[in-house]
Structures are given as C-alpha cells and as structure tokens.
Image (tube, helix red, strand yellow):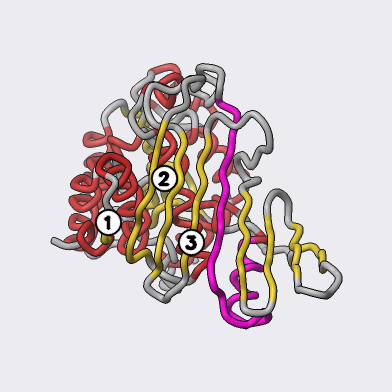
C-alpha cells in the first residue's frame, strides 16, 4: 500500500508522544507532513525533528486543514478543540483519528459525529486501554464461554492525587468532574468492552473528600445495567491513600456462571472456581498494544479493511455514559443512555 501522509494537530504532551510513536513504529507506512500547535517553540522543535519547513507548521488548525493535503489527520489537543478540529479536517477531505474523549460536551460530540457522517469519512477515537493482553484475554473467556455465562463485572480505579498538580496539570484539579471526564471515560468504555454490551441504565454518586486536592467531585460509585443483561459496578477514587489501582493497573473482576476472573496490572490472569485451586497464568501476547494497535487498525481501515472498533459512531456510547454520570451525580436520578444518544 502507498505511504499515507498525516497532519498532526497538537505537538506537545500527548501530541508529542503520538508524533514520537508514529515516527518510530509506522515510518514505513506513513509520514507526517504538517504539525499544528499554539506554541511556536513546540512547532520549531517538531519541525526540526520531522524535517518540516515553515510552510508545514501552523498555529491555526483551520488554516492547516485548508492548506495541507494529507491522507488523514491525527488530533491530540485539549478536548474542547476535538470537535472543531475534526470538523475542519473532514470538511477538507481528511479522515480523522482523535484522542479521547470525543469532545468537551455532548452537543460538541454530536456536531463532530454529524460532520463525519456528512463527509462519509473514517473517524476513530483513541481508546487505548482496550488493547492490552489481559483485557483481550478476558473478552475471549467471555466469548468462548470458558466459565459459562457472565453475570456481572466490578471495576476499580484508584490513584493518589492528594497533592495539588500530582495529576500532571493543575487544570485537572480545578475542573468540574475531573474523575469522570479525565478518568472514567476510559473505564466506562472498558465496561462496555469487557461486558460485550452497551449501557442501558446508569446511576450513581459522586463526592469530594475534605482532604482532596480537587475543587470538585473526585470520587464516585456508579452502577450500570447493560443491554445484554450484564450488570457492572465502578469505583473511582482520585484520593487513594492505600490500595492503588492507578493507570494501567486498574482492577476488574468478572463473575461468571462457573467461576470468576481477576485482572489488574501486568498481564496476569487469575481464575477462581469454588472448591478448586486458583488458576494463574499470563495472558497470550498481542501483536500491538495501546496506541500502536489503534493506529495500525486505523491505517488498515484507510486501506479498505475492517473499520476501527472505536469509530466515533460506536464510541459516542461511552462518552454518553460520562455525561449521564455527571447528571446522576447532581440529581441522584437513574439515567437512560438512549436519551443522550437521541436526536
């Protein structure tokens, strides 16, 4: 297949990491032909690293999308820019792969999805946590019914962010619903992936402990009923002082008809069956993980193969769960996810 050209919007932070990964892992399949960032020093750095001239470096994504003729656009900006940047890209004929969450509001996410549909172009959302060996193995256990039918799933995320700015940036500590918007967007998507169902009803509670470094709700419990009859339970805690299940070490327990499966950090699978010895083994390796898997899948989609599993039309179902969780936290009422996806 021909080498694909790519415009990257966002050159530092996650965008910088994305550029590095693309250079190292996909240089035989694609090349970066333009970079957008609001900071001139970032543009100069990436321009030198990529061998790009000034005509390929931009501070405005609208200008870049109109000027650069690329085969696709990769977006890694703060969430409030995801929707307008995607709209600009698809209106200029570029498929998009964008960092999660889809957008900063449900309205912006729907605007983004409608623009993608109108342009009839591929758009994938980066949900990298699905693509770890232990998560993939748990899904195989469910699909192959090795332990019979699945009953429910319990998930736990817990990080010690009691010190201000310990979660990377101060804005995460100052924003509303930091747990849900910056953390649970991953974990709700994981509940969909592991259960094999879409959320039907969501209810829960959120709070902020007095010793928290956050200005708004930073902890919560949420219950979900999936449309395939599976139930899920989620604990989120950004002020964890004891047992930690922080990034890439989140804990999940799946309760099946004939046993239970536990996974957390690493690739260890632990299977419990009443009256039997606990079974422990390493999940089979997968060819690519995380972001690498997603970009490989997306490039294959552009070459005419299977669409990305986390394409925007699917992933908006995970984003709607975040919005529903925000609202049930405020009013205490169960939420029907279909209401958020309508219209």
The stretch in magenta equals 135-161
| Mark linked to residue 99 | 2
Mark 3 lies on residue: 232
Q: Report helix, strand or loop for mark 1.
A: strand
Mark 1 closeness class: few <14, some 14–19, many ≥20 residues within 10 Å: many
Residue at position x 61%, y 47% in the image: 250
Measured in 3D between alpha carbons, the distance from the residue under mark 1 to the one under mark 3, in whole angstroms, is: 15 Å
Front-lying residue, 126 or 147: 147
Q: Position of residue 308 (x, y in %)?
A: 43, 65
Mark 2 closeness class: few <14, some 14–19, many ≥20 residues within 10 Å: many
Mark 1 lies on residue: 335
Residue at position x 53%, y 67% in the image: 152
Which numbered disc, 2 or 1, marks the residue that appears first in the sequence? 2
343 relative position to 81: left or right: left
Front-lying residue, 108 or 122: 108
320 relative position to 128: left or right: left
Measured in 3D between alpha carbons, the distance from the residue under mark 2 to the one under mark 3, in whole angstroms, is: 25 Å
Quadrant of res 338: bottom left
């Amino acid at each position: 297949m021909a080498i694909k050209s790519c415009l990257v919007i966002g050159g530092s932070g996650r965008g910088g990491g994305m550029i590095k990964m693309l250079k190292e892992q996909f240089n035989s399949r694609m090349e970066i032909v333009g970079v957008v960032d609001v900071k001139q020093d970032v543009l100069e750095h990436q321009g030198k690293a990529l061998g790009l001239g000034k005509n390929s470096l931009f501070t405005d994504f609208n200008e870049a999308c109109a000027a650069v003729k690329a085969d696709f656009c990769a977006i890694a900006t703060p969430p409030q820019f995801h929707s307008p940047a995607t709209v600009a890209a698809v209106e200029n004929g570029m498929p998009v792969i964008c960092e999660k969450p889809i957008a900063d509001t449900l309205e912006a996410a729907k605007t983004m999805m409608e623009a993608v549909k109108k342009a009839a172009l591929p758009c994938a959302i980066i949900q990298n946590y699905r693509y770890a060996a232990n998560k993939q193995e748990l899904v195989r256990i469910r699909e192959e019914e090795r332990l019979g039918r699945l009953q429910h799933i319990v998930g736990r995320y817990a990080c010690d962010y009691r010190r201000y700015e310990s979660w990377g940036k101060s804005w995460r500590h100052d924003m509303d619903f930091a747990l849900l918007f910056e953390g649970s967007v991953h974990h709700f998507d994981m509940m969909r992936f592991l259960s094999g169902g879409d959320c039907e009803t969501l209810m829960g509670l959120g709070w902020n402990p007095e010793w928290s470094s956050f200005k708004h709700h930073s902890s919560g419990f949420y219950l979900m009923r999936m449309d395939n009859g599976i139930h899920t339970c989620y604990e989120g805690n950004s002020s964890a002082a004891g047992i930690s299940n922080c990034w890439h070490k989140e804990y999940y327990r799946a309760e099946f008809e004939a046993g239970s499966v536990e996974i957390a950090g690493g690739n260890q699978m632990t299977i419990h069956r009443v009256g039997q010895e606990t079974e422990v083994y390493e999940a089979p390796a997968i060819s690519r993980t995380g972001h690498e898997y997603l970009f490989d899948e997306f490039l294959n989609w552009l070459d005419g193969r299977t669409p990305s599993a986390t394409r925007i039309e699917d992933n908006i179902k995970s984003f709607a769960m975040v919005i529903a969780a925000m609202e049930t936290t405020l009013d205490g009422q169960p939420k029907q996810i279909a209401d958020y996806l309508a219209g």
